[in-house]
Image (spheres, rainbow, N blue to C red):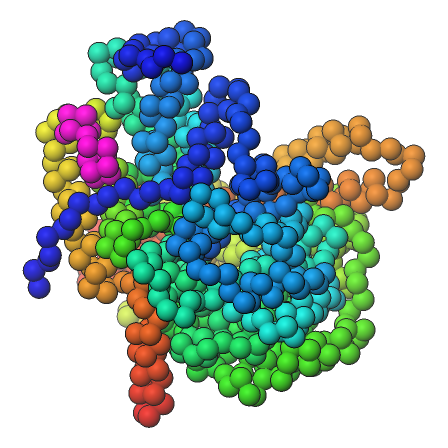
Amino acid sequence: MISDERSDVDLFGAWVAGDGEAGELLFERHFEAIARFFRNKVDRGHDDLIQKTFLGCVEARSRFRGDASFRTFLFAVARNVLGKHYRSARRSPIEFREVSIHDLGASPSVVYARDQQQLVMLSALRRIPLEYQIVLELHYWEAMTGAAIAEVLGVPLGTAKTRIRRAKQLLAAEYEELVSGGSTVQATETRLDTWARSLRKELFSSEST
Amino acid sequence: MPSEALTQPTAPAAPPLELERLRSAVKSRLFQKTQEPLRIGRFRVLRCIGQGGMGMVFAARDDELQRTVAIKLLRPELSAARLTDEAKALARLSHPNVVGIYDVGEHEDQRFIAMEYVDGCTLGTWLRGGRSLHEILEVFIAAGRGLAAAHNVGLVHRDFKPDNVLVGRDGRPRILDFGLARPPDRPLPGALIVVPSLPEGCDAEETALTRNGMLLGTPAYMAPEQHLGEPADARSDQFSFAVALYEAVYGSRPFRGDDIRTLSLAIVRGTLQRPATPRVEVPPWLDAVLHRALRVSPDSRFSTIDALLEVLVKHLGESMPATPHRPEPVLGYDDTLSLEEVRDVAAQVGLGEADARVALGKQAALMPRPSPSGVLLSPAGQHFRMDTAASSSIELTHRPSRNTMVLMAHELEIAEARRGKGHTQFIGESLAWTSPNLELRVLPKANGATILLVSDLTRALKRRLRVTLALTSFGGFMLFAAIAESLDPSGSDGRFIVAFLVILISEVLLGWRLARALHRQHLAQEQARIDHYNHRLAALAEAERTGPHEGLGYVPSQSK
């Protein structure tokens, strides 16, 4: 197969018109990014969500303006798919700017962290409201500009920049709290020795009263 | 304390095989192409069947031996360790209640274990099907035998829990994940921190504790010595076994806590929490066995799990006889209905009570619930085990005059004009205003009075129930009709009828649940409404106190 030089927009147009090969190429280009999108937000059913995202693009093609970037369109669809996923579980719409993955009680099981710091960072990301988590992950992992993020969220550029700023603040706060041991997540991540020792101490101190 | 510079979050990487599998799966579905089958070793991957603390589990096909196997692909950091002696011993162990190990191999830097594929569900899921005591004991005894067999060859599980026991379609339990989670003697260089984060909805009680990336057990089931970081032995397995059995019969865990720390403390102190209503009737001998096995000190427990099992087996014959074979419930039904409720439900669908009970699988020993005695006011009214009355009461510091009381009733009458006319009467010194759904009582006392408002939603609930039950029963009929097509009526009358009843009753219960949810909402709204009314009435009475004695200068409010 000769490597395709066609732009995303062209491939999308061809796919929508019935060219399966074009669709496959487009899929290959963006699959990993979409898989990454869902990785830190849902714990199972990734196949389904990724599939729905790509199909959703085809279904919503009338809303795709040819001059915009396909990638932002794709992520906007992914964001919708995510919202629908949680809405159906909770039977009420999700307030992206208020509720976090952690609040929803869902947690991506088995998060592969390179080290302790990354682990805590991923946990912190799941504790800030969904909208801000999305913004930061797009910003850091997909290297999206403010303008691109604005397109994904469907807001003006200024608003997007404010959201990015706010998101960073919230993340820093959550990270701090986790690192300083403010919540129970810390307990599971402490080394067992420290845990056991403190448990013993508590046991003895309460018995002596 | 100033925070350190926050470094940029980097994306979590998925293991190559999983990413590949995901890509393949989605691509083939999107583009209807058959992809090259993934292979692990000589096995052909069929699908992902789960994700555990140690890695992903796939169903795969051994084309050479023509059988389906389960492949557990260990995480990269877990794959580096030398195969422990225990893993080897496990591979040599062949017992009907232990998942058999067929092969071990490597696939792109990840170690995999090929093992027996069990077609069934976890013990946790199996227990949710409403099992009798006898059934539970049988399964746990069998599982216990598996544990005993492993103990006899020197293995310790360290993470026994219902999720680590698979129950096949043949009803035989097999224990999974033996001794593979043993921490290495020395921390591995560059060991990754692998923490299964809190699974959906279950929070602290499900999280596994880790040390240097190796799993050490699930807090809710871990023995006290494990919580304290001491080495675990066969008696720790016994403890975990007892926790699982306790949970199965009582319906809730012996040790509880809002977070892991509290839970750990409860376990280490041995503070058992007895549930208010056990799920099944628990005989004293079983209670004694559980208490012994749950002792904080390992020396106080049974010496071996065999000893524990002996006691269980001895009394097995005495436990309730196995329920007559009934088809698996179509939906998990709510088995906490009382006799009254069964009657109510049966009446709603026009079934005889006996038929309803058979379909619900209830035994003769149902606890009759005393029906609320008929009084003019029943603030704690209940029907179908739901509160059907909202009530509000306010204490006044001033005793209202008869005029005022009449005015209060009048006020309420106007506000409720839409819903029905009320009737006012004096019973001695107190006023009673009664309308179809709302009751007011003003009860004067020495230095004041009580205003009591009660709203009864029984009728509304009954109406709602009728509608939802009718709808869902209809659905049940349709479902049954569809199934009836494929059943041979001539040969299986009995099963036919029972299947019919089961489907019908399941639909009925679905309708009941729906009605209950709607009713609760309604009740909350009603409560808010009568609270509001009551405050208005109280304000009215206060106005009399502060205003002129005759003529309140009060204008009745317009109805809402």
Q: Position of residue A48 (x, y in %)?
A: 46, 32
Given residues B127 and B306, the one toward you in this image is B306
- Work out whether residue B485 can be spotted: yes
Q: Quick check: B325 above or below B467?
A: below
Asked whether B223 falls inside the magenta stretch, the response is: no
Q: Quick check: A32 above or below B510?
A: above
Relative placement, left or right, of A166 versus B93 is: left
Q: Quick check: A169 above or below A142?
A: below
Secondary structure that dominates the magenta span = helix
Q: Position of residue B316 (x, y in %)?
A: 77, 73
The N terminus of chain B, quarter of image: bottom left
* Image quadrant assignment for residue B444: bottom left
* Image quadrant assignment for residue A184: bottom left
The C terminus of chain B, quarter of image: top left
Residue at the outermost left position: B2
Q: Position of residue B547 (x, y in %)?
A: 19, 60
* Image quadrant assignment for residue B464: top right
Magenta span covers which residues? A135-149
Relative placement, left or right, of B492 versus B222 is: right
Asked whether A141 falls inside the magenta stretch, the response is: yes
Given residues A50 and A103, the one toward you in this image is A50
Query: In percent of the image, x 81 and y 66: which residue is there?
Result: B321
Query: In percent of the image, x 45 and y 75: which residue is there?
Result: B226
Given residues B233 and A126, the one toward you in this image is B233
Query: In percent of the image, x 39 and y 64: which residue is there?
Result: B210
Q: Position of residue B38 (x, y in %)?
A: 53, 34
- Work out whether residue B266 can be spotted: no
Query: In percent of the image, x 79 and y 75: which residue is there?
Result: B318
Q: How many marks?
A: 0
